[in-house]
Amino acid sequence: MAEDRKAYRIKDDTLGEVQIADEVVAIIAGLAATEVEGVSSMAGNITNELVSKLGMKNLSKGIKVSVAEGRVNVDVALNIAFGYAIPEVSAKVQEKIKNAIENMTGLEVAAVNIRIAAVDMGKGRK
């Protein structure tokens, strides 16, 4: 692994250990966030439609992950579509990210902090 990347040990037994890179946790969070109705894109302007063209690594844009003692803190910057209630969409994003990370990694999510970076006027409610 590159020196600037972190990995988190989630399993260590007689068969060996399992580690998850911090970028993988960020990608999980990015995918979960973009699945919520009202989220236009991540602050890096990446949407699910672009993933196949640009690759998975771009989904981690706008996301900062830190893990301490098996507890994950996630900071997410996203763009919201015009016409959606920010508190409602933010709560759904927080829950979706928490569930996705906990189910896929086994790590406990301590906090999911949302920052609304912009309102997308072109993707409003129909």
Image: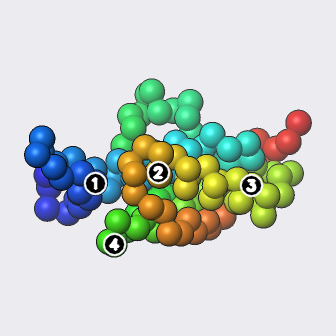
Q: Residue flagged by tag 3: what amino acid is it?
A: Val
Q: Calculate the distance from the C-alpha at mark 3 to the C-alpha at mark 1.
A: 30 Å
| Tag 3 and tag 2, C-beta contact below 8 Å | no
Q: Residues within 10 Å of mark 1 (few under 14, many from 20)?
A: few
Q: Earlier in the sequence, mark 3 or mark 1?
A: 1
Q: Secondary structure at mark 3?
A: helix
Q: Earlier in the sequence, mark 3 or mark 4?
A: 4
Q: Residue flagged by tag 4: what amino acid is it?
A: Ala
Q: Earlier in the sequence, mark 2 or mark 1?
A: 1
Residue beneath disc 2? 101
Say which of marks 3 and 1 sits in front: 1
Q: Secondary structure at mark 2?
A: helix
Residue beneath disc 1? 10
Q: Residue flagged by tag 2: what amino acid is it?
A: Ile
| Tag 2 and tag 1, C-beta contact below 8 Å | no
Q: Calculate the distance from the C-alpha at mark 3 to the C-alpha at mark 2.
A: 18 Å
Q: Earlier in the sequence, mark 4 or mark 2?
A: 4
Q: Residues within 10 Å of mark 2 (few under 14, many from 20)?
A: many
Residue beneath disc 3? 89
Q: Secondary structure at mark 4?
A: strand
Residue beneath disc 4? 68
Q: Position of residue 91 (x, y in %)?
A: 71, 59
Q: Residue at x 40, y 67 (%)?
A: 71
In the figure, is residue 60 to the left or right of 42?
Answer: left
Q: Earlier in the sequence, mark 4 or mark 1?
A: 1
From this viewpoint, which residue is outermost toward the bottom? 68
Q: Calculate the distance from the C-alpha at mark 3 to the C-alpha at mark 4.
A: 27 Å
Q: Residue at x 34, y 72 (%)?
A: 68
Q: Nearer the viewer, residue 56 or 24?
A: 24
Q: Residue at x 54, y 61 (%)?
A: 76
